[in-house]
Amino acid sequence: MKLSTVAVAAIAVLVGPQPGIAQASGVDRLYVFDCGVGHAADQSRWSPGVNAGKPFDISGNCYLIHHAQGYLLWDTGVSDAVAAMADGQPGQNGAPSWHRARTLAGQLAEIGVKPSDIRYLAVSHTHPDHIGNVELFPQAMLLVQKAEYDWPSPFGVARFKPEHPVTKLTGDHDVFGDGSVTIISTPGHTPGHQCLLVKLPHTGAVLLSGDAVHFKDNWDNRRVPVVNTDRDQTLASMQRMADVLAQNHAELWINHDKPQSEAQRHSPQFYE
């Protein structure tokens, strides 16, 4: 029996979106950029009581999402200037040292994207390894939690230039208005930390962790780094993330988990 177009449409409405099946959206590409590699002498800074004195390496990624309405850049890594430092950027007070093999600007140019093409710039939080290149994009609308923007800097200066256009968020935010890219408020690592849920048409949904969790073992065991600003908020945010992952049949992409990062496709390849 041949169904009419109206009948097919009616059935689609009745059936509705199917779990695990990516729905049509304005998002069509996600690029993973190399935004630095860090080395730390003591892993227990991030996993209290576990792997004390064990050195380890971490990845630092940035992510470019292309939507029909424009580009969103998620995190900017350590400063591109680090790429010119033969010995990298040294760490202080137990924080990682950083090296950059490639600049963010160079990786964007490789795929034909100019800094002026970036419509939105969102950062998971304001630690230096995530905001190092914010001012490469002075015209991009910055999307950041108000709690993060207003968080006093230990250096006594503003975390962003006051003239940079900004939308100060107070919770979750649907970036393009179609549910394809959603900022998820996940405080704890810092007062206004946030993650990013991206629904790709073929890959499916992915949740970009920022520093809500630093590597898989910490996620599996719900460990809270001593450097986080609020332990209870961190644990609540991890549970929120678990709920978002389950509700959207999503994968968790952990920014600083180097083995996971090395297994992913990096720009100029992309995810659809």
Image (cartoon, helix red, strand yellow):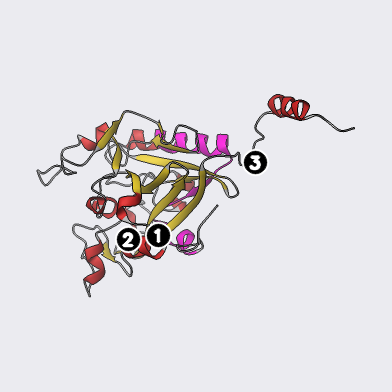
The reply to whether callout 2 and callout 1 are in contact (CB within 8 Å) is: yes
**Label 3 – label 1 distance at C-alpha:** 26 Å
Q: Amino acid at mark 3?
A: Ile
Examine the residues drawn in magenta and state their main secondary structure.
Answer: helix
- Residue visible at 75% across and 26% down in the picture: 6
Residue bearing the label numbered 2: 104
Q: Residue furthest bottom?
A: 86
Give the residue pinned by disc 3.
Answer: 21
Of labels 2 and 3, earlier in sequence is 3
Q: Residues within 10 Å of mark 3 (few under 14, many from 20)?
A: some
Q: Quadrant of residue 108?
A: bottom left
Give the residue pinned by disc 1.
33
Of 12 and 127, nearer the camera is 12
Dot 2 crowding, Cα within 10 Å, few <14, some 14–19, many 20+: many
Residue range (magenta): 236-262
Q: Is residue 215 above or below residue 153?
A: below
Q: Position of residue 222 (x, y in %)?
A: 44, 43
User: Disc 1 marks which amino acid?
Assistant: Phe
